[in-house]
Image (tube, rainbow, N blue to C red):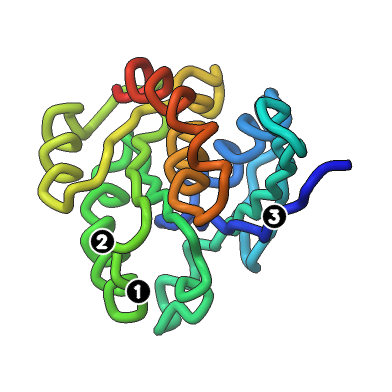
Amino acid sequence: MKRKSEFISIGLIGDSLVGKTKLLHQYLYKKFKSVSYQTISLSILTKQIDFYDQYPPIRETIKFFDIPGLLKYQKPFSISKKLSAIILVYDVSNKFSFYSLDYWIEQLEKVIDLTSIPVIIIGNRIDLNRMISKEDAKEFASSYNFKYFEASAFTGKGVDYAFDYIVYKTLKRMPNQLSIVLEQKNKKINNKCYM
């Protein structure tokens, strides 16, 4: 019988129409969600990960909170207090979505200590013409001590690397025996997923 752990929750935060929902859909279902619409309410999707490397096996349930960009006009972010990790998303073809990251970080810092949880930034839509250079984005991320990734929800490139990184970083912080199992897995992920 599997031992079930507590839920962990990861929030996707960023401006509307940067592709948060499509990134999540690509990660969970391995396909591009072609229908475009603006997320107008909080959406929660889950993924279960089984670890058979130990006895008894562990099943971790990851909750992904797809937080609509329209929340930009509502404060504070009460949901953020409950997050185990955060993925900040912007669109590399939309410079304003990149500039908005400062706003999102400022709002998050009002309700949560961002140094206490894993936080990454994903530059989405690398399949389009970029308006923000990779170097500028990396520099911005490192100024907050966040890891930076680039991905395309359309092609799937980089999506698994970024999500696997944040999932395993979050699971590793959990105070249970799973952190030992993840030590080796994390080495593999760290070596290949940083863009």
- Looking at the rendered image, the disc whose residue lies closer to the viewer, 2 or 3, is 3
* Residue at 72% over, 49% down: 46
Query: For residue 63, which numbered disc appears in the image?
Result: none
| First of labels 2, 3 by sequence position | 3
SS at badge 3: loop
Label 1 crowd bin: few (<14), some (14–19), many (20+), radius 10 Å: some
* Residue at which label 2 appears: 115
Side (left or right) of 45 relative to 89: right
Task: Please identify the quarter of the rendering in which residue 140 is found.
Answer: top left
Q: Residues within 10 Å of mark 2 (few under 14, many from 20)?
A: few
Q: Is residue 96 above or below residue 151?
A: below
In three-dimensional space, the C-alpha distance between marks 2 and 1, rounded to whole angstroms, equals 9 Å
Residues at marks 2 and 3, CA–CA distance in whole angstroms: 24 Å
Residue closest to the eye, 112 or 58: 58
| Above or below, 2 relative to 70 | above
Which amino acid is tagged 2?
Thr
Tag 3: amino acid? Ser
Q: Does residue 144 appear to the left or right of 82 in the view shown?
A: left
- Is any part of residue 19 visible from this angle? no
Q: Find residue 141 and report its horizontal and vertical position in percent.
A: 19, 44
Which secondary structure lies at badge 1? loop
Query: 119 or 93: which is nearer to us?
Result: 119
The residue pinned by badge 1 equals: 112
Q: Residue at x 64, y 42 (%)?
A: 36
Sequence-wise, which precedes: disc 1 or disc 3? 3
Residue type marked 1 = Ile
Instruction: Point out residue 169 in the picture as x, y percentages from the top left corner.
Output: 43, 42
The tag on residue 5 is 3
Task: Name the spot of residue 28 as percent of width and height, x first.
Answer: 68, 34
Q: Is residue 106 above or below residue 13?
A: below
Please report the residue visible at 48 percent of the width from the left and 60 percent of the height from the top. 84
Locate the N terminus by quadrant. top right
